Image (cartoon, coloured by chain):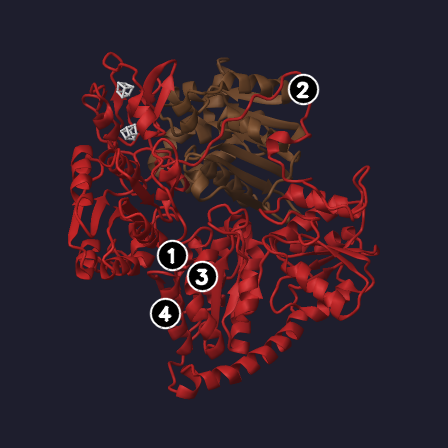
Amino acid sequence: MNKNIILCGVGGQGTILASKLIAAAAMKKDIPVMSAETIGMAQRGGSVFSYVRIGEGICSPMIARGTADLILGFEPGEAVRMLPYLKPDGQMVVSSRAIMPVTATLSGSSYSGDAMIAYLREQVRGLYVVDGEQACREIGSPKVLNILLLGAAAESGALGFTEEELREVIKERLPEKFHEINFRALSYAREQKETDHFRTEAL
Amino acid sequence: MHKEFLMGNEAIALGAIAAGVNLAAGYPGTPSSEVLETVAKRRVPGTYVEWSVNEKAAMEVAAGAAYAGARVMVTMKQVGLNVASDPLMSLEYIGVKGGMVVLVADDPGPISSQTEQDTRHFAAFSKVPCFDPCSAQEAYEMVQEAFDYSEKYGTPVFLRPTTRVCHGYASVTVKEAEEYRVNRPEGFVKDSGRWVIFPRLSLRNHEKIEARNETLSEDFSSYERNRIYPSGGRGAASGFGTAAGRDDASGTDSCGGTGKKGIAAGGISFTYAMEALKDSPQPARLFKVATPFPFPEKLALQFLYGLDEVLCLEELDPVIERELTYLCGKHHLPVKIYGKLTHHVKNAGENSRDSVNQNIADFLGDAAGQEDISRPLAQSASQPPSQSASQPSSQSVSQPSLPVRPPVLCAGCPHRASFYAVKTAMKGKKTIFCGDIGCYTLGNAMPLDMVDTCLCMGAGLGIAQGVGRIEPDTSCFAFVGDSTFFASAITGVVNAVYNQANMTLVVLDNSTTAMTGHQPHPGTGRTVMGDVTAKVSIEAVLRGIGVSVVETVNPLDLSASVACVKRVAAEPGVKAILFRSPCIAITKPSGCLRIDQDRCIRCGKCIRELGCPALVTDNGRVCVDASLCTGCGFCAQVCPVDAIRKPSGAQPDAGAGPAQAGAGEGNGNPAQSCGGGDGNE
Ligand code: SF4
Ligand code: SF4
C-alpha cells in the first residue's frame, strides 16, 4: 500500500491527532510511514496541515502537488486551499462547516462555506461531504470532528484502513474516558449511511 | 533494535541517549524544543537535564560538564545560537574532553523565527564541525556519530537539522536500552595550561584547529553519510536511513549517472532531490553533503570530475554552492555551478518538493519547452498552492477566494486582556509599545494593534529606553513575557534603573513558556526533570534591582487592570506592572459564556475591540463559539449592556485539561467543551 494523505484545517481542530492515528495504524501493520505537520505560531488559529505518507520507498515526509491520494478537509476553505495537492483521481472527505477567521469576523467580510463546497463538487470526483456541525451535535462533542472524518474516510475506502483498525489505535492511544465518544464518532459515517441520512455524495 | 514512530527531534534525543549523553541543557525555541524535552522524558538514570535560563547559560553549563569528561548536548534554535555564541567561540579554542553536540535547529521559511540565518555559516565562522541530517533516521544515527567525532577531535560539533527534519515524523529504527553506550565521566582534571584561555594559548590552539579541520575535511570525505549517487563502489546500503536509505541500491540506479549533469544537495533538500530524480527520465549524478563544514573536498572533487554543470539545492544560504564554486576555481575545473548565487534557485524561503521538482526539471531540461539553464529561473516554483495549474478537472466554477488566516492569540488568552487594559488606560496619550518574542508578539494584530516594535529576545526594554531618550514626552512601554524576562530582560531593567530611564515595564506572566510548547522556567517552581524547585520571584527581582513601583494585577479583571496601568504609568522613573494569569493551555477551561440574544444590541463592540476567536457572527447575530470559548469572562466586562453571561447552572467543565484550541492541539484529547455545543445556536 502506498498512500499520500493530507489533513487540513484550522489550528485547534485536531488534525494532528488524526494524523497520529493514521500513522499508528500503519505502524501496527509494519508499513513504513512518515508525516509532517504545522507546529508553532501558525497553530494559533492559522491554516494547518498534516501530511502522512505511507508505503515503501518514501524519502521525505512532504507531499508534492498533484500527488495526494486523499485529503481530509476539516474546513471547506482549507480543503480548497489544499486542492492542488490532490491527484486527478484522488478522493476528498470534507466537513461543510466553515470557520471564519477572526479577521473576517472583524471586517465583516466572511466567505461562504457553501461556495467552497460547490467548487469542490465541480473539481473533485471522489468527494464526500460531511455535515460536521450536525454530526458533532448528535455525537455530543464539538471536538470529535477529527475522528468523524477518519471514520468517513475509512468508510469510503479511501483511507486504506478499516474502522476496526482505527478503533484499535484509538483504544491504545487515547485515554479511556474518551473511547466511547470517539467510537461513536468513528462509526457515525457508516451508521448514517446505513440509515440513509448521511449526506454523502460521490459525484 | 525496534521501530518507533518518532518526530525528528525525538529521534535526535533518543540518539543522544543511546550515545550515553550525561548532561543536556538548552533553552526552548521552535523548532528545537522537543529534543531536550524528550531527553528528559526518556533519560536513563543518572542523566541530568535542564532548561537553562538562556542559551548562553546552557552552553556554559554543558562546557563545564564536558571539561569533566561528560558527554553533553546543548539545544537551541538558530537565533539562540546568537546568544550562546560568546561562550561557543571561545570554547572552540579551548576544546572539550567529553563529547559535546551543539544542537541548533535552523528554520527555513522562516516559519517561527525572526531570521533565516544559516548555522552552517556559524560553523565555518566558529570553526566548529557541522553535521546536517536529512531525515529522522539519519538524525538518530548521526547524533551518535557526532559524539564520536567530537571526542576523537576534542571539539564541540554542531548537529544542524532544519524544521522539516526536526518536526517530520518517521518510523525510526532505534536501539534497545541494553545497546546504549554507558559513559562514565572521569571528572575535571586541573590543568591551567589547558582550561584557561590566554592569548598565547589561543594562538597555539588556533593553529591546531586549522590543521585539524583540514584533517577533518579528509576524514569527512570518507564519512559514509557524505555520498555520491550512484555510489560506484562507495559504502554499502547504510546511506541515509529509513525507507529511502535501505533500498538505495535500486533507488540510485534510477538516478542514473552517465550524464554530464550533477546535483549537490544537503539536508531535507537532498530527500526532495532523491524523490525528484527517481521520477526523472534524465540521469544525473547526485552528491549528498552531510557535513557542510569542514567541507569534504576530496569527495566533492570526485563528484565534480567529468561533469559539465551542477545544480545546488540547499536551504538558507548558498553554502554548498560557494564551496563547489571555490573548488572549481582552485582546481581549474570547467564545471558550471548553479544555485542561489546564479539565481537559478530562489535565495530566500524554504524549498518544497514542488520547488525542487521544478528546479531539477529546468536543470535537466526534461520539462517540455524548457529553455537553457543559463536563463535564470524567474519565479517558477513555490507559488502559493491556490495558483497551481494542476486542477483535476473542468474550470467552469472559478475558485472562490480563500480566507486569510493570520495566527491570532487563542480564545481566552490573558495577553489579550493585558493589551486591552493598557490600550484603554493609555487612550489619547502619546505612547510606544515595544513588544518582544513570544505568543504576545501576536498582540500586534488587529484589533489590538499593541506591538509597535519587536526585534529579539529582551530587546523591547532597550528600545523603549532609546525611544524615550529621543522623545521624552512619549510614554514608553516594554512588554515582556515571563520566560523572556528571565532569559534576557533583566540586564535591560538594570540598565534602565542605573541610567534613570523613564519607562513602564509590563511583564505578561502566564506562568509558562507558551509559544514553544509550555516549558517550565525559573518562575514556575518546576524543572524539566519534574522536580519542584524554588520559584524565582519577578517582583523580588525587580525590587532588588531598584524598581520602586511594582504592581501585580489579574488582567482578566478589566477595571482593576485599567486603574493599575493609569496609576503606574503616571509615576516617574522605571516602574513595572505584572499581569499575572496562566496560559489557557495549562489551565482547565471554566465553562463557556453565552450571549443573551434578547439583551444584545448587536453593537459589535466585543468583536471589534477584542478579536477573540470565540466571538463570531452568525446571520447578523453575535455568538460565542462553544468549542473555543474558555470562559475567561473578559468579553462580558467589555459589553456595554451586560449581554454576555455564564449560562445559569453551567458546570465547570470536567474535560481533560489542555485540550483547548490552538496551543493545546497536540494533546489530542477531544475533551468536551461546555455542554450542548450550541455556540452558533
Ligand atoms: S469568555 Fe469571551 S473573551 Fe473569554 S474566551 Fe470566551 S468569548 Fe473569548
Ligand atoms: S458587546 Fe455586547 S451588545 Fe455589543 S455585540 Fe457584543 S454581546 Fe452584543
Q: Viewer-proximal residue, A66 or B401? A: B401
Marks 2 and 4 share the same chain: yes
Lower position in the chain sequence, tag 3 or tag 1 = 1
The three-letter code of the residue at mark 4 reads Val
Q: Tell me the chain of label 4.
A: B
Discs 3/1, front: 3
The image's mark for residue B594 is: none
Separation of disc 3 and disc 2 at Cα? 50 Å
Chain B representation colour:
red
Q: Which residue is mark 4?
A: B61
Q: Amino acid at mark 3?
A: Asn
Check the image and report above or below for B364 versus B99.
above
Mark 2 is surrounded, within 10 Å at the Cα level, by few (under 14), some (14 to 19) or many (20 or more) other residues, namely few
Whether marks 3 and 2 lie on the same chain? yes
Drawn side of residue B621 relative to residue B118, left or right: left
Frontmost residue, B660 versus B177: B660
Q: What is the x, y in percent for residue B179?
A: 50, 67
Upstream in sequence: badge 2 or badge 4: 4
Instruction: Tell me the number on the disc at residue B41.
Output: 1
Judge if badges 4 and 3 mark residues of a common chain. Answer: yes
User: Judging from the image, what secondary structure is the residue with disc 3 in?
Assistant: helix
- Subunit that carries the residue with mark 1: B
Residue topped by disc 2: B395
Q: What is the C-alpha distance between the residues marked 4 and 3?
A: 17 Å
Mark 2 or 1, which is nearer the eye?
A: 2
